[in-house]
Each structure stands twice: as C-alpha cells, then as structure tokens.
Image (cartoon, rainbow, N blue to C red):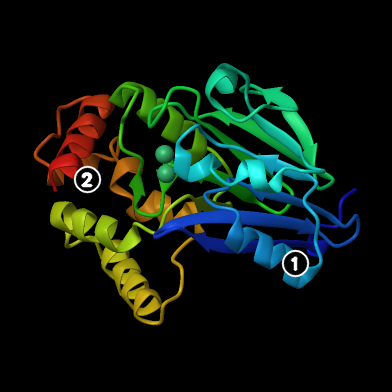
Amino acid sequence: MVNTSSVELVVVPCLSDNYAFLVHNHDTNETALIDAPEAAPIAKVLADRRWALTDILITHHHNDHIDGVAALREGARVIGAAADAHRLPALDLAVAEGDVITVCGLPTHVIDVSGHTIGHIAFHMPGPAYAFTADSLMALGCGRLFEGTPAQMWQSLLKLRALPENTMICSGHEYTAANARFAASLDGAHPDLILRIEGIETARAAGEPTVPSTLLEEKRTNPFLRADIPEFKAVLGMAEASDEDVFAAVRAKKDKF
Ligand code: ZN
Ligand code: FE
C-alpha cells in the first residue's frame, strides 16, 4: 500500500500561462513530471528540492506541452499515447485508454480524452486523487476543439466527470478568469458560479494559481460539464435539445466570446 500522505504535488508555472506538475513520493524518492512546456522552471524546482525525474508523462502533442521534454528526459521514462507516438518525443512507454501504470509507486490510470486533439490522454492517480487533464477539462472550461468533434469532447468530459468528486483537476493553463467571464455571460445568476468567481478574482489578484480545482467545483459550475443539466439547458433556451447539441452550442459560443 502506498502511503499517500508522503505524496506531494507541485504546480510549476511555465511560459505565459501553462502549468506543469510534479508528483514526488517522499518514501520512494521518485518524481514524475506531467507535461513539459519548457525546461528551465521545471529544472529549477527539481534542483531546489534535489529531486530527479523518474518519469515524464505527456498528455498531448502540442508544443506548449512537450518542448521541455528533450532537455529534461535523461534518466526518466517518457510516457505518452501510443496513438500519438508519431508526433510525440520518443516514448519509452506507449499507453492507451484503460492502461494502469505505476508512477511514483502510484497506480495511474490512462483515460482517452480526445477532443482538443485526437490522442489527448489524461492520467488519473486515484490514491492522492489527482487527475492531469491538460487541455481537456480545465478550470471552468475545456480545450478548444482543434481535431475532435463536440460529441467526442463531450464523451471525454463525461469520463472525467465520473471520477470521485474530491479529485484535483490539474489542467494545463491559467485561463480561469477568462473562462469565468464566459460562464457568467451564460448563467450569471447561478449562485455556485458567483461564489466561485469571487474566489477566482481573489486568487488572481494575489497572483495565485486557480489550478488545481476540484471535480466537485467543476461539476457545479463549469458550463462544459453542465450540458445535460435541465436547469442549465433552460437558461440557454435549449430545454429540448440533446446533451451533445447543448455542449456543441456552448463550445461554439466560447470560440466567439
Ligand atoms: Zn494543447
Ligand atoms: Fe495547451
């Protein structure tokens, strides 16, 4: 049994608005990196704490998630989607939906969350309740659909929504304030949303990240997770529409917001 109290999560701001994440197990001295937007800020955290990377987990092929891999990978096992191996840095372990791998001594489940890209995966560590969702489910948002269809992204989000509500959603960007403005434009009278936006404004004014959030917060307030909620459909004037059509309409509005 892994003692999850000896597992630590570090959020590493990178580039202008990206996040990388480090998971460290103090019992085994293993350290995993999830996404590598750029090497320098990650290398600095590793040096300050005298941690060495044992694993690098890649969520998807976009440059702002992989550009730091080459400079950081020595001694580490690089893990990514088999389906995307042709456009990822060379993989030491290629994974697919349903695989359960061991990272930092922790069972880690691979979930296909295609939509933003085809081949985007998320990593779920049930022990410490972390989900690394990058540009799929984001704080009050979801990734733009560059490759997948709205129906694909909706199915991906439903998989993530089914995780335990205490799961910490470790997403890939600090887009939350803009996402909040959009959410408020749709459903500005929603009490949970009003409260959450106050918290977001306080955090950003103090220069603090709004990531990770909890899945419970996202279920209550993220418009992209609420496309099948009758009250939300009614607010949008889409009471009779299918869940997928509501999701597609919300995503289309966000693209133009
Ligand atoms: Zn991306
Ligand atoms: Fe990204």
Q: Answer with left or right where residue 237 lies relative to residue 233.
A: left
Residue 62: x and y in percent read: 45, 36
Q: CA distance from mark 2 to mark 1?
A: 50 Å
- When the figure is inspected, residue 207 is found, relative to residue 85, above or below; the finding is below
Residue drawn at point x = 87 percent, y = 51 percent:
2
Image position, residue 150 (x, y; %):
29, 26
Amino acid at the residue labelled 2: Glu
Q: Is residue 125 left or right of residue 28?
A: left
Q: Indicate yes or no: mark 1 CB to ligand 2 under 8 Å.
A: no
User: In the image, is 37 to the left or to the right of 30?
Assistant: left
Q: Which mark is residue 231?
A: 2
State the residue at coordinates (46%, 39%): 63
The kind of residue tagged 1 is: Ala
Q: Is mark 2 within 8 Å of ligand 1?
A: no
Report if residue 134 is visible in the image. Answer: no
The quadrant in which residue 74 appears is: top right
What residue sits right under mark 1 in the picture? Answer: 47
Residue 207 found in image quarter: bottom left
Q: Earlier in the sequence, mark 2 or mark 1?
A: 1
Along the line of sight, which residue is nearer the eye, 23 or 187?
23
Residue 59: image location, x then y, percent:
55, 36
93 to 171, vertically: above or below = above
Classify 10 Å Cα crowding around label 2: few (below 14), some (14-19), many (20 and above): few
Instruction: State the image coordinates of residue 241 (x, y, percent, origin top left).
Output: 17, 27
Instruction: Look at the numbered disc 1 and give the secondary structure of its residue.
Output: helix
**Crowding at mark 1 (Cα within 10 Å: few <14, some 14-19, many 20+):** few
Most extreme residue toward the front is: 71
SS class, disc 2: helix
Above or below — where is 149 with respect to 204?
above
Q: Residue at x 52, y 49 (%)?
A: 37
